[in-house]
Image (cartoon, grey):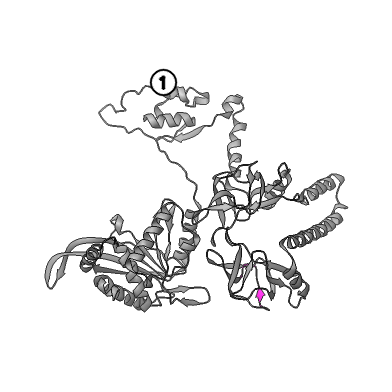
């Protein structure tokens, strides 16, 4: 049966999309997960994959053409299937008509399932029949008129799940179209998510700090007073649930064990801390906080609460005893092992996933060099003597890499499963450390920018990164990456390639040390660099030639201005 593919909403502000490239043509076989086309949105050009299998029977938007979100993009179905009526309908139907058609098809499938279910019911007992009917009735619950289910949006091309950082609306609030509902933490940044509907916020599916997969239930908006409990329940049964929803199950187990506890004591939270001798200390959160503030070792405190639990008054009444010293003056250290667990952020999980994939799929090898920085130091001092001008050594390295890459396109290449892409443009990713990990904003067409322009761009990116304001578009499209730890005093290190790029340059600090010049030992300044290459695209000689060209620009920086 034919399936209509509409223009997807690939970003939170996307209203229309342009087909940059079709990767399938009419008549091609399509599998679930195949990339159908590259769609240019208001933020980036993103790959759009198929959720259906079959034959591509019709393409409604040609390469370079633009259409609104939810308009007909393509049709997938059985080979030779007549889709002329669908094409006419797709060109003339509004969004509401398309939704009505989809709902009708869903109801038809539901009826077919119910028919099959009826055949089975005849063979079961009356009690089983009743359960089946209840289940069928629940599953077929409809969404009330005017009610809209809001799902977790895909706010970046690599986003698989999101975390609600902050709700800007609460249940019962009126919502206008365009209002900011919440701030969503993705794998790349924390972004504002605006409402595309007007009404009352009837239900919030995720609390602040909770996470869920893309397309899982986020909220429900509709007319004030509408009962949506059934909608939320049925959607949760089919969709994803948040990570923290299972947490209460782990905390309920102790209630059965402590049958003698009074209701008041059951409601008090208890933390468990390990001591140096392997014992366990039961302590209330408040008591633990007070002990930490006063520097009290909990292993020395006797608890007066139930089962020896340490509570607030035990910390208030605690009097430190004599020092723990052995009889012959031997000191016995008294302390406790302590730790805290912190949930991995979306950014940290994505870094772990992508770098692990890169390290274990791309055959890395490393080329190490050491450059004389004497001329570079003098050049920077002279350049910065110009009023209102400030460039860094990192800016000089980015510019030098950009110029060298134009001469060595193989190093500026990218590896894909079925092809190698030699890029004629140079977009350099600059690794920036942030609290949650590492982001890589991209200096576009770096070879065409001046040193001050590169410096201003990198400084702007660094500020945005610290404030989590980088957009996905500003972190996409790199062809080469520079990672600099010189400002932290690191002399040399190796980096993992930012795939699908073929190489990444690690930059160390400038070190003042004795060097040999013209047969004499003099004071010099050197900097170590390490080029990590993907051996599938960059051979050793090719990487070495690139570093020779880079050496010429770094050790004679005036040549970058010619």
- Identify the residue at image location x=73%, y=45%: 230
The question of residue 9 being in magenta is answered with no
- Identify the residue at image location x=77%, y=51%: 142
Residue that protrudes farthest toward the front in the picture: 387
Q: Position of residue 79 (x, y in %)?
A: 73, 77
Between residues 514 and 103, which one lies in front from this camera angle? 103
Is residue 226 in view? yes
The question of residue 31 being in magenta is answered with yes
| Quadrant showing the N terminus | bottom right
Left or right of 345 on screen, residue 101: right
Between residues 139 and 201, which one lies in front from this camera angle? 201
Left or right of 138 on screen, residue 384: left
Residue that protrudes farthest toward the right in the picture: 122
Q: Compared to 318, does 36 lie above or below?
A: below
Q: Main secondary structure of the magenta part?
A: loop
| Magenta segment boundaries in residue numbering | 28-35
Between residues 536 and 550, which one lies in front from this camera angle? 550
Q: Secondary structure at mark 1?
A: loop
Q: Position of residue 531 (x, y in %)?
A: 35, 69
Total labels drawn: 1
| Quadrant showing the C terminus | bottom left
Q: Position of residue 103 (x, y in %)?
A: 76, 59
Instruction: List the residue tagged with mark 1.
Output: 317
């Amino acid at each position: 049966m034919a399936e209509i593919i509409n223009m997807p909403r690939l970003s939170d502000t996307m209203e229309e999309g342009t087909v940059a490239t079709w990767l399938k043509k009419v008549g091609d076989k399509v599998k679930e997960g195949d990339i159908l086309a590259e769609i240019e949105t208001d933020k980036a050009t993103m790959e759009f994959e198929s959720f259906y299998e079959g034959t591509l029977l019709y393409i409604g938007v040609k390469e370079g053409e633009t259409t609104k979100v939810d308009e007909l993009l393509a049709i997938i179905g059985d080979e030779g299937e007549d889709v002329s009526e669908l094409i006419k309908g797709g060109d003339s139907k509004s969004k509401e008509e398309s939704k009505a058609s989809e709902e009708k098809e869903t109801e038809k499938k539901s009826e077919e399932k119910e028919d099959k279910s009826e055949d089975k019911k005849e063979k079961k007992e009356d009690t089983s029949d009743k359960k089946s009917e209840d289940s069928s009735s629940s599953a077929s619950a409809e969404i009330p008129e005017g009610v809209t289910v809001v799902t977790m949006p895909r706010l970046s091309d690599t986003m698989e799940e999101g975390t609600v950082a902050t709700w800007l609306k609460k249940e019962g609030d009126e919502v206008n179209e365009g209002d900011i509902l919440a701030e969503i933490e993705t794998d790349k940044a924390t972004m504002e998510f605006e409402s595309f509907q007007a009404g009352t916020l009837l239900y919030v599916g995720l609390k602040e700090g909770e996470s869920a997969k893309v397309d899982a239930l986020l909220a429900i908006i509709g007319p004030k007073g509408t009962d949506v409990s059934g909608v939320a329940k049925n959607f949760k049964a089919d969709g994803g649930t948040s990570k923290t929803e299972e947490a209460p199950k782990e905390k309920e187990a102790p209630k059965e064990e402590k049958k003698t506890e009074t209701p008041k004591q059951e409601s008090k939270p208890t933390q468990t801390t390990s001591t140096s001798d392997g014992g366990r200390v039961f302590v209330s959160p408040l008591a633990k906080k007070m002990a930490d503030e006063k520097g009290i070792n909990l292993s020395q405190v006797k608890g007066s609460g139930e089962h020896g639990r340490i509570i607030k008054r035990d910390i208030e009444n605690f009097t430190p005893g004599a020092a723990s010293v052995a009889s012959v003056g031997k000191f016995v250290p008294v302390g406790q092992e302590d730790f805290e667990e912190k949930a991995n952020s979306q950014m940290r999980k994505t870094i772990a996933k992508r770098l692990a994939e890169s390290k274990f799929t791309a055959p890395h090898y490393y080329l190490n060099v050491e450059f004389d920085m004497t001329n570079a130091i003098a050049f920077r001092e002279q350049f910065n003597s110009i009023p209102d001008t400030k460039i860094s050594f990192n800016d000089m390295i980015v510019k030098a890499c950009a110029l060298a890459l134009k001469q060595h396109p193989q190093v500026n290449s990218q590896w894909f499963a079925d092809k190698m892409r030699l890029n004629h443009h140079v977009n350099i990713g600059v690794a920036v450390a942030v609290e949650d990990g590492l982001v890589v904003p991209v200096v576009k067409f770096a070879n065409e920018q001046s040193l001050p322009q590169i410096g201003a761009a990198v400084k702007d990116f660094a500020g945005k990164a610290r404030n989590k304001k980088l957009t996905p578009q500003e972190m996409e499209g790199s062809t080469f990456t520079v990672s600099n730890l010189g400002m932290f005093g690191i002399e040399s290190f190796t980096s993992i390639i930012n795939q699908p790029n073929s190489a990444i340059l690690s930059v160390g600090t400038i070190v003042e040390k004795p060097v040999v010049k013209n047969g004499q030992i003099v004071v010099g300044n050197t900097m170590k660099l390490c080029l990590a290459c993907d051996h599938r695209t960059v051979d050793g000689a090719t990487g070495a030639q690139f570093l020779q060209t880079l050496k010429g620009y770094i050790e004679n920086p005036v040549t970058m201005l010619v």
